[in-house]
Amino acid sequence: MIALAEQMEEGALAMERRLAGREQNLKGNLRISSTDWFGAYVLPPILADFSNAYPNVDVEILTGTRRFSLAQREAEVAFRAVPFDTADVIQRRLFRLEYGVYIAEEAADPKYGDGTGFRLITPSTPHFPDIAWLIESFPNARPVLRSNNRNVQGRMCREGVGIAVLPCVVGNQIPGIRRLDLPTLPPARDIWMGYHRDLRRLGRLRAFISTVSDHLVNAAA
């Protein structure tokens, strides 16, 4: 019974997506999923242009560590730091995200390869590639705070709690911290955008994707 119910739900969702994908009117809701920092530091100028160009589209931004389902239309488009792993998602690599090492403006520079007397702020998710790099670069610094929120890491860095690795688009926008000039850089990551293939002709989604593309072109110019 459960298996049959799941098949019925999948069929109903597929029908809903395909009917929605035919909508060409530039109005209605558009749900966007991303991490907290991406929603706070990358999306605002894109959404400002999109909202000005398409005032009848109501945008909803869902941020956090949860991956909202594109198949179930919990979101129409999502931004992630890893590729999408389902065949029904159309995805595009948007740009290479650079990371930097930040410290409070008034703090002294830690010695690269040492870090004695300094403290580290690290992500609470252990598989992030910047954690191993940070600990290896400052082996004698002591981890004192972990957080799954890049904005929190940056704010704590500003308060002098410790050294933090942040996406440059985040660290460069937080007042009171400065980027360290180091001989090597933290590992960069790719940012991906994905949406369900059934919605590829949805008018408001296509308009949003076009706005994202325009911003990338202008940023590269």
Image: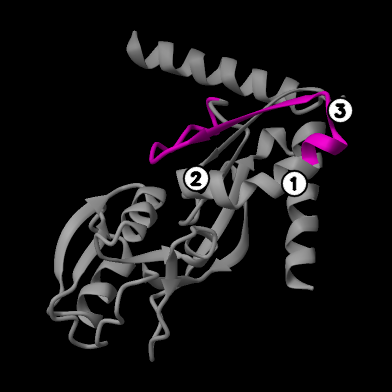
- Tell me the number on the disc at residue 161: none
The residue that appears at 25% across and 64% down in the rendered structure is 162
> Left or right: 164 with respect to 146?
right
Residue at mark 3: 24
Q: Residues within 10 Å of mark 2 (few under 14, many from 20)?
A: few
Which image quadrant: the C terminus? bottom right
Foreground: disc 1 or disc 3: 1
Amino acid type of the residue that numbered disc 3 sits on in the rendered structure = Gln
Residue at mark 2: 86
> Left or right: 69 with respect to 90?
left
x and y, in percent, of residue 26 in the image: 85, 28
Amino acid type of the residue that numbered disc 2 sits on in the rendered structure = Thr
Q: CA distance from mark 1 to mark 2?
A: 20 Å
x and y, in percent, of residue 23 in the image: 82, 24
The residue that appears at 48% across and 49% down in the rendered structure is 37
x and y, in percent, of residue 40 in the image: 54, 45
Q: Against 17, is 77 above or below? A: below
Which image quadrant: the N terminus? top left
Amino acid type of the residue that numbered disc 1 sits on in the rendered structure = Ile
Residue 90 visible? The answer is no
Foreground: disc 1 or disc 2: 1
Residue placed most toward the observer, 197 or 138: 138
Which label's residue is closer to the chain start, 2 or 3?
3
Q: Quadrant of residue 77?
A: top right
Residue at mark 1: 209
Q: CA distance from mark 2 to mark 3?
A: 26 Å
Q: Quadrant of residue 144?
A: bottom left
Q: Is residue 126 magenta?
A: no
- First to last magenta residue range: 50-72
Q: How many marks overall?
A: 3
